[in-house]
């Protein structure tokens, strides 16, 4: 995600891949995205006792039944998850290293331009996967000389777009 | 020697494939998340791989059928679905041509522990 502190090289935010191997309790969590990964993480982290905020840029669970997804969102809110619609992160900064670390998360409401900053211990990006197929080069896979070469890539680059 | 493979990619850098999972390069096939227009789900990718292997090496002809793949969202209230969504059906057939039923039920095991999946409005 091309936002200061949200790029893969910043090594501040994590994805759903790293959530299961954290050195510490996730604590206060901000999740970016409205995907099923975002909502699943929100659900189980909340159940484990984390304080969870979900920043949804547009809609949750695109291409799924709106009637059901609205119900699921209400259910998540009733369980204490803070669902914020129309908000996107503008900057994530590491305030303090450590386990847990302290992060400052700034996000903006697209419509009104209102900006808020909150403290968090864990920021999870769940905004989808980015294919890295354009980086494929022949030298890396044996120059494709064999008659039948099956190239299989189940999961491409992680979700830090 | 860094040769680009010459694969045709879509706007999201996914590999464009035909219904037999073949890319534009004759000896490269692509299945799963990196194939354009395919669901980002593990079981269909596994199935597509098995069928592709059977076609390439096993003399079989069967193609992967990507219609009506069921999936689940593991939110606290779990949501599973298959086929066309209500929104897509409304768009295709018009809302007045569709009847929609909603039914809610508790998993039986929850009645023992008196857990509740449905919050009160």
Image (tube, grey):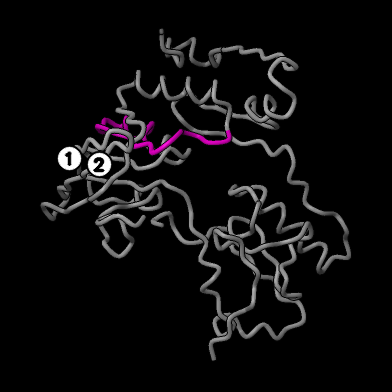
Tell me if label 2 and label 1 are in contact, CB under 8 Å: yes
User: Which mark identifies residue B18?
Assistant: none
In this view, the residue in front, B93 or B44, is B93
Q: How many discs mark residues in the rendered view?
A: 2
Q: Residue furthest bottom?
A: B1
Question: Of marks 2 and 1, which one's residue comes earlier in the chain?
Answer: 2
Disc 1 sits on a residue from what chain?
A
Q: Assess whether residue A56 is covered by the magenta stretch.
A: yes
Q: Position of residue A153 (x, y in %)?
A: 59, 63
Q: Position of residue A10 (x, y in %)?
A: 26, 62
User: In which image quadrant can residue B6 be found?
Assistant: bottom right
Q: Assess whether residue B6 is covered by the magenta stretch.
A: no
**Where does the N terminus of chain A fall, quadrant-wise?**
bottom left
Q: Secondary structure at mark 2?
A: strand
Local crowd size for mark 1, using a 10 Å CA cut-off: few (<14), some (14–19), many (≥20)? some
Marks 2 & 1 on one chain: yes
User: Which mark identifies residue A117?
Assistant: 1
Q: Position of residue A31 (x, y in %)?
A: 33, 41
Residue drawn at x 11%, y 52% as measured from the top left: A95
In this view, the residue in front, B109 or A37, is A37
Disc 2 sits on a residue from what chain?
A
Per the image, the residue denoted by label 2 is A107
Q: Secondary structure at mark 1?
A: strand
Q: Is residue B72 left or right of residue B57?
A: left
In this view, the residue in front, B5 or B114, is B5
Label 2 to label 1: alpha-carbon separation: 6 Å
In this view, the residue in front, A1 or A139, is A1
Q: Which residues are magenta?
A: A42-63
Q: Is residue A36 left or right of residue B10?
A: left
């Amino acid at each position: 995600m091309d936002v200061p502190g949200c790029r893969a090289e910043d090594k501040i935010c994590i994805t759903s891949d790293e959530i299961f191997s954290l050195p510490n309790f996730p604590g206060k969590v901000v999740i970016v995205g409205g995907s099923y990964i975002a909502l699943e993480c929100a659900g189980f982290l909340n159940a484990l006792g984390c304080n969870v905020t979900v920043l949804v840029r547009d809609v949750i669970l695109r291409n799924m039944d709106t009637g059901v997804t609205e119900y699921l969102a209400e259910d998540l809110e009733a369980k204490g998850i803070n669902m914020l619609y129309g908000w996107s992160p503008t900057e994530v900064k590491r305030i303090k290293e450590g386990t847990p670390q302290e992060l400052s998360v700034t996000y903006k409401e697209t419509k009104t331009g209102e900006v808020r900053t909150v403290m968090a211990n864990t920021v999870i990006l769940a905004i989808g996967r980015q294919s890295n197929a354009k980086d494929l080069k022949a030298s890396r896979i044996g120059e494709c000389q064999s008659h039948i070469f099956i190239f299989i890539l189940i999961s491409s680059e992680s979700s830090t777009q | 020697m860094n040769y680009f493979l010459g694969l045709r990619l879509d706007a999201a850098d996914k590999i464009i494939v035909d219904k037999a999972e073949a890319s534009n390069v004759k000896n490269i096939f692509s299945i799963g998340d990196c194939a354009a227009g395919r669901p980002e789900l593990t079981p269909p990718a596994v199935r597509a791989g098995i069928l592709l292997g059977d076609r390439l090496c096993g003399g079989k002809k069967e193609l992967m059928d990507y219609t009506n793949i069921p999936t689940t969202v593991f939110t606290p209230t779990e949501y599973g679905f298959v086929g066309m969504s209500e929104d897509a059906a409304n768009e295709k057939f018009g809302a007045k041509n569709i009847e929609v039923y909603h039914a809610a039920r508790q998993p039986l095991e929850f009645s023992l522990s008196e857990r509740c999946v449905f919050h009160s409005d």
